[in-house]
Image (cartoon, rainbow, N blue to C red):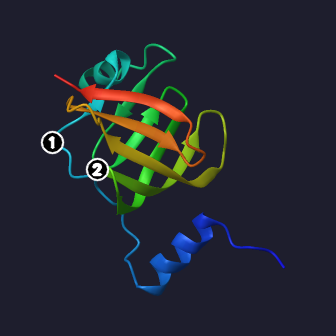
Amino acid sequence: MKRPSCLSALLSLTVAVGVPAISAELDIPGNYGNEAGCRHAATGDFEGDDLLLLTRRDVSTYATLCSFVHLYPAEADSHVAVVTCGHEGEGYTTLGLMRVQKDPDGVDAYHIFDEDGATWGKAGRCP
């Protein structure tokens, strides 16, 4: 017998409670990113493979854009997000989970993790 994954359980719960199919938004007061991410937010330019940008509706890197579909509050001042992701050069969209956590040291920043716990990086408040 096949065991359901956490992702399929979250999606089943989302469908079961009748959550509308709209994008979710983080309650953050602006854009957060590294230097390349903040530059992209300000100018639209994609410079540097290290681009990381967190907005109310999505997380993006140089080659990936993941949009929040649903957000679940989690412990340690974080959110678990169901995301759909597009990838540079690919004609398909993937479905996944991410965790966005407020910096535990009180810095105005967020840490972004994929569903396996690997870090995408730290995003500080853009000017």
Residue at x 62%, y 52% (from the top left corner): 94
Q: Is residue 34 above or below residue 96?
A: above
Identify residue type, mark 2.
Asp
Q: Which residue is mark 1?
A: 29
Q: Position of residue 54 (x, y in %)?
A: 34, 37
Quarter containing the N terminus: bottom right
Q: Position of residue 41 (x, y in %)?
A: 28, 28
Identify residue type, mark 1.
Pro
Q: Residues within 10 Å of mark 1 (few under 14, many from 20)?
A: few
Q: Is residue 13 above or below residue 37?
A: below
Q: Is residue 12 above or below residue 127?
A: below
Residue at x 15%, y 42% (from the top left corner): 29
Residue at x 66%, y 45% (from the top left corner): 91
Q: Which residue is mark 2?
A: 77
Left/right placement of residue 72 relative to residue 85 reads: left
Q: Work out whether mark 1 precedes mark 2 in sequence or the reverse, and give the earlier one.
A: 1
**How far is disc 1 from disc 2 in space, using C-alphas?**
15 Å
